[in-house]
Image (cartoon, rainbow, N blue to C red):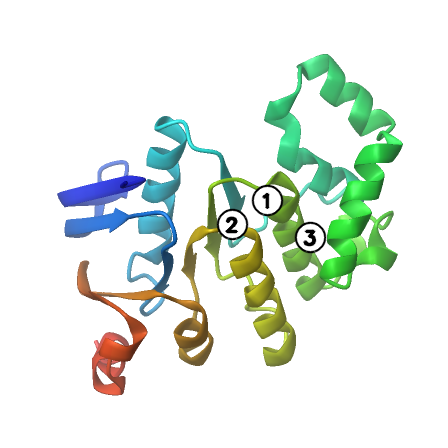
Amino acid sequence: MTLVAFGNETLGYGAETVLTGVSFALTPGDRVVLLGRSGAGKSTLLSACYDRLITAGHRVALAPQDHALVPQLCVLRNVLMGRLDDHSALSNLRSLIRPRQADRHDIDQTLQMIDLGNQIDQRVDSLSGGQKQRTALARALYRGGAVLIADEPVSAVDETQADALLSLMADRFQTSVLALHDVGQARRFATRLVGLAAGRIAFDAAPSEVTDEMIGTLYAQ
């Protein structure tokens, strides 16, 4: 079963071409990590995967690089937004004004797993960068789904915490596509590494098949 597939396609934003000749398929159980320099097209491929998965009717959890949080609202209400499309507009309005105790309990459990339990009622604009990043991840975890799409979801935390969060993502989502900047973390997490360089996919292989020289080439261009 293929969840999403691209066959020799051109991807970009509007009229701007970012990637060409893209052939890529995602199947259940894949943990794909995209590697490459800033501007190599990782976010473009992530966005294209997300759009096609949604169009195909899959439930997808998203943790974007810019977090997409509402700074004036508390952590609880930002995480609650992960399930807005599960309910009517009126039900969502009621929940945002006065979150249900059952929702608060579920969100608190999620926040406890990522060491944010004490911040559940804190406004997002009062949080550190790492706390904001974990709030965006908590929203994705709370949403759940068939696939996780995440753009640099652990870049603002230390290595030990990053490994713990990546392990949690692997446990909670059968399938995922992530962009990571730390090659060691990518190797430990991924079942497939996809390298992007010069506007194309340079390689798509199991971590054991990707040499340090292949990765070095990505960042030398």
Residue, x 80% and y 25% (percent of image)?
Answer: 95
Residue 29, horizontal then vertical, whole percent: 39, 53
Left or right of residue 105, residue 166 in this image: left
Please report contact status of discs 3 and 2: CB closer than 8 Å, yes or no.
no
Q: Nearer the viewer, residue 191 or 15?
A: 191
The image shows residue 101 at horizontal and vertical percentages of 88, 33
Label 3 belongs to which residue? 135
- Residue located beneath label 1 in the image: 68
Task: Residue 50: give x, y in percent of width and height.
Answer: 39, 40
> Label 1 to label 3, Cα distance in Å?
10 Å
Q: Helix or strand or loop: what does disc 3 sit on? A: helix
Say which quadrant the N terminus sits in: top left
Crowd rating for badge 1 (residues with CA inside 10 Å; few <14, some 14–19, many 20+): few
In front of the other: label 1 or label 3?
3
Mark 1 touches mark 2? (CB < 8 Å): yes
Q: Disc 2 residue type?
A: Pro
Q: Amino acid at mark 3?
A: Thr
Which quadrant holds residue 192? bottom left
Residue of label 2: 64
**What is the CA distance from the residue labelled 1 to the residue labelled 2?**
7 Å
At 52% from the left edge and 40% from the top edge, which residue is drawn? Answer: 145
Q: Earlier in the sequence, mark 1 or mark 3?
A: 1
Secondary element under disc 2, as helix, strand or loop, is: loop
Are there few (<14), some (14-19), or many (20+) residues within 10 Å of tag 2? many
Q: Compute the Cα span from label 3 to label 2.
A: 11 Å
Q: Is residue 154 above or below residue 149?
A: below
| Residue 170, percent from left and from top | 52, 60
Task: Determine if residue 75 is in view.
Answer: no
* Residue neighbourhood size for the residue with mark 3, other residues' Cα within 10 Å, grouped as few (<14), some (14–19), many (≥20): many
Q: Is residue 145 left or right of residue 89?
A: left
